[in-house]
Amino acid sequence: MKEVFDYIDAHQEQYIQWLQDLCRMPSVAAQNRGMKETADRVMSDLQKNISADVQLVSTDGYPVVFGEVKGSGKKTLSFYNHYDVQPEDPIEMWDEPPFASNIVDGKLIARGSADNKGNLVARIAAVHAYQQVHGELPLSVKFVVEGEEEIGSPNLEGFAEKNKELLKADGCVWEFGYKNADGRQQVSLGVKGMAYVELVSKGANTDLHSANAAVVENPAWRLIWALQSIKDDSNHVNIPGFYEDVVATTDEDDQLIADLIYSEEETKQQLEINKFVGDVTGDQLKEQLIFSPTCNICGIDSGYTGEGAKTVLPSEARVKVDFRLVPNQDPYKVVDQLRKHLDAHGYEDIEIKTMGLEHPARTEPSDPLAKSVISATKEVMEMEPTVMPMSPGTGPMYELCQKLGIPAVSVGVGNFASNNHAPNENILIEDYISGIKVIAQLMEEYAES
Amino acid sequence: MKEVFDYIDAHQEQYIQWLQDLCRMPSVAAQNRGMKETADRVMSDLQKNISADVQLVSTDGYPVVFGEVKGSGKKTLSFYNHYDVQPEDPIEMWDEPPFASNIVDGKLIARGSADNKGNLVARIAAVHAYQQVHGELPLSVKFVVEGEEEIGSPNLEGFAEKNKELLKADGCVWEFGYKNADGRQQVSLGVKGMAYVELVSKGANTDLHSANAAVVENPAWRLIWALQSIKDDSNHVNIPGFYEDVVATTDEDDQLIADLIYSEEETKQQLEINKFVGDVTGDQLKEQLIFSPTCNICGIDSGYTGEGAKTVLPSEARVKVDFRLVPNQDPYKVVDQLRKHLDAHGYEDIEIKTMGLEHPARTEPSDPLAKSVISATKEVMEMEPTVMPMSPGTGPMYELCQKLGIPAVSVGVGNFASNNHAPNENILIEDYISGIKVIAQLMEEYAES
């Protein structure tokens, strides 16, 4: 592999340029910005740079870019990525323009740099470098690049059902991966599921002068009381049945948890917080992060929120809530339970808009793909990676992989301070380069496994 | 008075034009828009149209426009009004542009038409008509027109303390007044007080990917739990001591309540609601509207509130809350009680920003000014007005009037469907014209009382 690594080092500038170019293309699925242009660009990158057979597979939403490169070995490794990114707001909190792709102090700062264009381009670059040095890949690779990950992949399940042949693979490298605060690479063996909903509470048919508050009900208050009924300040989700399908951790899980390093003090300093939820520390903190389902408010909005004081009784209140789910919670069931809970508490009038449903998914640590990823990472990074039994993040892994019998493992070029979904999203250039090498190494190791 | 009434009828177009012109000037104190231009315009209207001696009295905020016209009688009647208006958002819900001053189906639709420019110009027009017919007024009048009513009059108390001589009067006609849904004019004998606060809850120093919600506290949840601790779904304010200074209603109050007509079914239909807060009806509903203090959410905001789904853990959450207070609650004391309550519930970190404090105020029904207003209204409207012992709305009445021994009564040109503080704010042209006549009649009756 030395030749391939040398080739990657010698062509750094080119690979950085590829990534900068892609990060300069806004592709915000939630706002339908730049989606077609970016899908076309990924198609042409796969075709021109690594001679992939490509196709744009239509869905009921944004299309999936599919690319395939045949290799000499029997195995097929697939890469799941996405070309869409999160909205960039609050834009005033960015130090660099979010789509300028500026490099500052060894960091590429751009919306999408860590989530997920850095990983996509690193994988293309790894295939490219291997091809330039060896001519042919040691295994076949497939690229599955969707455009709706950041809005909950609403059409990926349908895509997976219709395109089982395209998806066939021995293993799948999942979209993301990070370095910890302690410098160790993380390898994750699963993802949490998700039920993303918007709750809408309505009062009078128009905003009113707040003098009416003595007699006309305020939908913001009703929404607050409904939310309180869902989760109180003990942080416990009070929806009946919410926890009933949660699988207890195994001894192996507990061992992986114990081996994990979570830099508590560093995290608290970085985020300027003085404790963690529930005031937990140590293994309990790590277990909570990885194995606890959550109920999080992503956004809440009602009435007058501008400058100064306006005395208004709002006519409507909205909240966006994401539930992160763990095996074997079922997102469809959770939404049903939520509806029943609201009804039982007298909130029949509060509407639930379902905005994304994803099952949790896991791969066993003993799986050959898991072993190859761990080994390739160790080889390149020259230290043991951290193995996460499951990522606290979410993705449509179940539909694309486990449901079809394909193991999936996450490794990638982000880091603990990459600010995914937040201002100043970034990756370190050195992580990007070593991430390219990890994928090159993995192709060789997994081909032989 | 017939001559004056005839003059008013004959010069309707001119008086409507005066009002349209003033409503075309945005003067949003909360956003510092058009304030100077509008104050200057009110000055010149008072000077040119009714030959008032005017002065612009500076305060720590927007200045107060003061105008005085001497009359033949000994009495002095003052008019309190304001030249600022509420912000116009949500602008997309207006049928006419908020500052176009369009007249549609006999209604002038404009931000500020009801609150409060319609009343200000009606009073100027009444003085003008009386002068044109009789040469001299039967009493002296003073105009006190402030620019910060819609942001809680933060500097009016200071103004009142420094300008006691200017404010001296036998009685004050307060800024607002409405016709009920049943067509009867309302005369109000007081206002509720107010404590307007913004609560700010902070979490991590940046928005985070919501995968972190398992371990990093969400300031929106904390704000919701804090709000729930302040007022639960029984609608009771749970701040210790909040109700302790509330004065019980007298038999006279109960009689005024019993005499009031509140069109429950019409209100429910108009607002498309199916019940009132606490499911009350009849006298209990009216008493609640007038004599209950409130705790209302004017606006709440956190995280991502745009289109689609964004999985974010917000770094901050804010809520604007107005407490409407009744005699003898003290707004300063309420804010202290709120601080103590939050601290006692573990929300020491939630910041309280005080945005407006006003005392409640009342005038007795037996006061000569109250009697003159009731009588003048009856004379012009040809029916008994509804007498409200106190308006459910708020204003700086206490500082300008009761504190200086001046009785204050509200009567004006708005109506039940005027949409104050809301989209499509409007008044009926016919109410505007009869409102001018009421003030003309009142000047004569009060001069003789």
Image: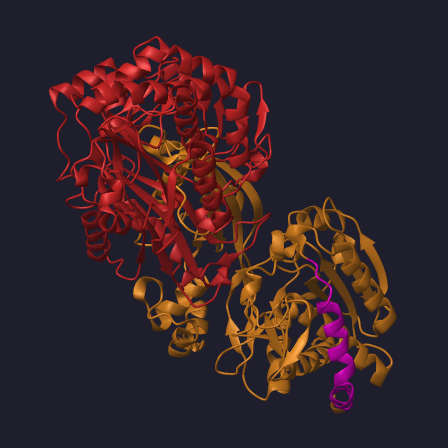
Chain colours: A red, B orange
Q: Measuring from the top left, give residue A150's x and y in whole percent.
A: 39, 42
Which quarter shows the C terminus of chain A?
A: top left
Q: Is residue B241 visible?
A: no
Count the labels in the image. 0
Above or below, comparing residue A271 to residue B269 in the picture: above
Q: Quadrant of residue B285?
A: bottom left
**Residue at the spot x=40%, y=66% of the render?**
B287
Q: Measuring from the top left, give residue A435's x and y in whole percent.
A: 40, 21
Above or below, comparing residue B78 to residue A92 in the picture: below
**Residue at the spot x=46%, y=16% of the render?**
A7
Which quarter shows the N terminus of chain A?
A: top left
Nearest the viewer among A268 and B24 is A268
| Left or right position of A177 against B429 | left
SS majority, magenta: helix
Q: Quadrant of residue A347?
A: bottom left
| Left or right position of A383 against B190 | left
Nearest the viewer among A282 and A76 is A76
| Left or right position of B447 against B364 | right
Task: Answer whether residue B31 is magenta in the image.
Answer: no
Q: Quadrant of residue B376?
A: bottom right
Give the farthest residue toward the top: A382
**Residue at the spot x=64%, y=69% of the render?**
B97
Q: Measuring from the top left, give residue A282's x and y in whole percent.
A: 27, 16
Above or below, comparing residue A204 to residue B352 in the picture: below
Above or below, comparing residue B27 to residue A393 in the picture: below
Nearest the viewer among A71 and B3 is A71
Q: Is residue A161 visible?
A: yes
| Left or right position of B188 against A400 | right
Magenta part of the protein: which range? Answer: B3-27
Task: Answer whether residue B10 is magenta in the image.
Answer: yes
Q: Measuring from the top left, give residue B354's x and y in whole percent.
A: 55, 42
